[in-house]
Image (spheres, helix red, strand yellow):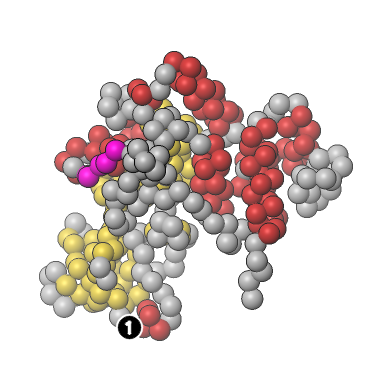
C-alpha cells in the first residue's frame, strides 16, 4: 500500500503528499469508530482509487501532536510574537513555551514588527530577547516590512516540520509571504475595536519553504494545560529545570520549600522575576484544574 504525509486537512478531506503528487483522501469509518482523527503532519497508509483520490487506511504512530492547532509530528514551533500591534506579551509567550516544551518540540521565538517599535520599546524588546536567550531559547527579531532578520530564519526551517503559532494579528501570514512570496497568503490588520488580530488563516496546511515544511495555523490567544501535571511544569522552564538541581528536596515545586535552588536563583537575579511569577501562576492553574475521571 502507498504511504505519504498529510499536508492539508479541509472540509473532511485529507490531502496526502506522495512523491510530489497530491492525493485527495477521505478517512475510513474505522477512524471514527476508534476515535482517531487524522492530522496534518501524519504519516499515513492510503489506498488510491485513481491518480487523485483515495482513502486513508492507517495513521502511523506519532512522535507528538498538538490540539490547538491540530497538527502532528512537529520538529519545531516558531512562536511568532509582535513587538507592537498587539504588544509583546511575556505571559502569553510563556504559555506557548510551556505547551511546546511539554510536547518535546523545539521552540524558536520570532519577534515581528520591530520596524514599528519606538526606540524605548525596541530597548525593552531587546532586553526580553536577551533574557529568553539566557534561558536557552533561540530568538530572532524580524520585520516583514523591511525584511530584517528574515535570512536568519531559513537555516532553522531546513529539513524540519515547523509550525508557526502565536496570537492573532502578530504577522504570521505576512512573515510567510516574505519567506515565500508566491504564497500570497491573505493578511489583515488588527481590529482597532478589539485590540487583537482578525483571523486570516482558516485551516492548517504544510507549505514547502526552503528545504523544510512550515504550517501556517489559525491564530489563537489562549492555551489550556489539560495534560500537564504539577510535577511536569518545572521541566517546561529550562532555566528553572537547571536551577532545580540545587534544590534540597526531590520533587520540590519551588513555592514554600526550604533551600530551593529556583527561589535562590530568582532572588539573585539569575531567573527573571516575571518568568518565576508565570511559573507560579501556571502551577496554581494546574492545581485548580478539575480532576478528570
Q: Secondary structure at mark 1?
A: helix
Image: magenta residue range:
185-189
Q: Position of residue 203 (x, y in %)?
A: 30, 57
* Residue 41 included in the magenta stretch of the image: no
61, above or below 193, in the image: below
Q: Is residue 147 visible?
A: yes
Point out the image quarter for the C terminus: bottom right
Left or right placement of residue 126 versus residue 234 in this view: left
Residue located 48% across and 17% down the image: 120
Residue pointed to by mark 1: 29
Label total for image: 1
Residue located 45% across and 33% down the image: 87
Residue located 45% across and 48% down the image: 221
Toward the left, the furthest residue is: 51
Give the main secondary structure, helix, strand or loop, of the magenta stretch: loop
Q: Position of residue 69 (x, y in %)?
A: 40, 56
Residue located 39% across and 59% down the image: 71
Toward the right, the furthest residue is: 258
Toward the front, the furthest residue is: 193
Q: Is residue 157 visible?
A: no
Q: Position of residue 254 (x, y in %)?
A: 77, 44
Left or right placement of residue 258 versus residue 33 in this view: right
92, above or below 122, in the image: below
Point out the image quarter for the N terminus: bottom left
Q: Position of residue 129 (x, y in %)?
A: 51, 27
285, above or below 171, in the image: below
Amino acid at each position: 500500500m502507498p504511504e505519504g504525509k498529510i499536508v492539508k486537512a479541509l472540509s473532511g478531506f485529507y490531502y496526502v503528499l506522495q512523491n510530489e503528487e497530491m492525493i485527495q483522501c477521505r478517512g475510513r469509518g474505522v477512524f471514527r469508530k476508534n476515535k482517531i482523527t487524522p492530522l496534518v503532519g501524519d504519516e499515513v497508509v492510503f489506498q488510491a482509487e485513481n491518480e487523485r483520490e483515495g482513502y486513508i487506511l492507517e495513521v502511523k504512530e506519532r512522535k507528538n501532536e498538538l490540539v490547538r492547532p491540530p497538527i502532528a509530528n512537529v520538529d519545531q514551533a516558531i512562536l511568532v510574537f509582535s513587538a507592537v500591534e498587539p504588544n509583546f506579551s511575556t505571559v502569553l509567550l510563556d504559555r506557548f513555551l510551556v505547551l511546546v516544551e511539554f510536547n518535546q518540540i523545539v521552540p524558536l521565538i520570532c519577534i515581528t514588527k520591530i520596524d514599528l517599535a519606538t526606540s524605548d520599546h525596541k530597548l525593552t524588546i531587546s532586553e526580553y530577547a536577551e533574557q529568553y536567550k539566557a534561558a536557552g531559547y533561540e530568538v530572532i527579531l524580524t520585520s516583514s516590512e523591511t525584511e530584517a532578520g528574515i535570512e536568519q530564519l531559513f537555516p532553522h526551517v531546513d529539513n524540519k516540520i515547523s509550525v508557526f503559532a502565536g496570537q492573532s494579528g502578530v504577522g504570521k501570514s505576512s512573515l510567510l509571504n516574505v519567506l515565500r512570496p508566491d504564497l500570497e497568503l491573505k493578511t489583515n490588520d488588527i481590529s482597532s475595536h478589539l485590540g487583537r488580530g482578525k483571523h486570516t488563516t482558516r485551516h492548517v496546511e504544510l507549505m514547502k519553504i526552503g528545504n523544510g515544511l512550515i504550517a501556517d495555523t489559525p491564530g489563537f490567544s489562549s492555551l489550556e494545560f489539560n495534560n500537564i501535571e504539577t510535577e511536569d511544569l518545572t521541566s517546561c522552564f529550562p532555566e528553572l529545570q537547571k536551577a532545580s538541581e540545587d534544590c534540597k528536596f526531590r520533587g520540590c515545586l519551588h513555592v514554600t520549600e526550604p533551600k530551593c535552588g529556583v527561589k535562590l536563583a530568582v532572588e539573585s537575579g539569575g531567573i527573571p522575576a516575571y518568568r518565576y511569577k508565570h511559573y507560579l501562576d501556571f502551577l496554581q492553574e494546574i492545581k485548580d484544574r478539575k480532576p478528570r475521571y
